[in-house]
Image (cartoon, rainbow, N blue to C red):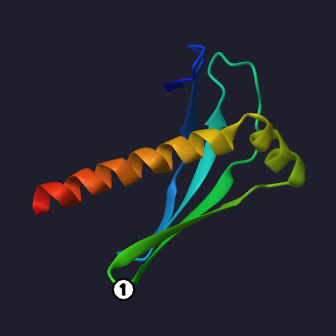
């Protein structure tokens, strides 16, 4: 479980469906609203993350396939894109730290 800025708890569950080392991860993701009192639809989403190296830089692409347009719209209304941006910014920062420690 995680907490949002108001202290409300939420989380995600899922199963790994496919792993291609250094290339792709596919998994399901179901939203657990915890004590937030919101819903993101009933069916899990399918998340595909691909990793492509170009000139020594790894590009990461994430595709989310929702069970329905209504599920997608409900997810977007939660502000999930802000949370995803925060997560990717943190990942960028950590990777930059790791790279500087290796030099």
Query: Can I make out residue 20 in this image?
Result: no
- Tell me which residue sits at (56%, 14%) in the image: 7
In the displayed structure, 7 sits above or below 58; it is above
Q: Quadrant of the C terminus?
A: bottom left
9 and 15: which is toward the camera: 9
Q: Where is residue 41 drawn, in percent x and y?
A: 79, 40
**How many labels sit on residues?**
1
Name the element at disc 1: loop
Neighbourhood count class around disc 1 (C-alpha, 10 Å): few under 14, some 14–19, many 20 upward: few
In the displayed structure, 16 sits above or below 72; it is below
- Tell me which residue sits at (40%, 73%) in the image: 58
Which residue position is annotated with label 1? 55
Q: Residue 98's quadrant in the figure?
A: bottom left
Q: Where is residue 26 drawn, in percent x and y?
A: 53, 65
- Left or right: 44, with 53 as reference point: right
- Tell me which residue sits at (65%, 15%) in the image: 35
Q: Where is residue 49 drawn, in percent x and y?
A: 52, 66
Q: Where is residue 43 drawn, in percent x and y?
A: 75, 47
88 and 48: which is toward the camera: 88
- Tell me which residue sits at (62%, 21%) in the image: 34
Q: Which residue, as the protein is rendered here, is positioned at the far bottom? A: 55
Q: Residue 75's quadrant in the figure?
A: top right
Query: Can I make out residue 66 in this image?
Result: yes
87 and 12: which is toward the camera: 87
In the displayed structure, 83 sits above or below 93; it is above
- Left or right: 102, with 71 as reference point: left
């Amino acid at each position: 479980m995680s907490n949002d800025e108001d202290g409300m708890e939420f989380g995600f569950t899922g199963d790994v469906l496919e792993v291609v080392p250094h290339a792709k991860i596919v998994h399901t993701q179901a939203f657990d609203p915890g004590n937030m009192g919101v819903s993101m639809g009933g069916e899990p989403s399918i998340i595909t993350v691909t990793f492509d190296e170009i000139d020594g830089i790894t590009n990461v692409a994430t595709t989310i396939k929702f069970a329905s347009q209504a599920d997608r719209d409900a997810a977007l209304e939660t502000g999930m894109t802000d949370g995803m941006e925060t997560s990717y910014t943190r990942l960028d920062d950590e990777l930059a730290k790791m790279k500087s420690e290796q030099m």
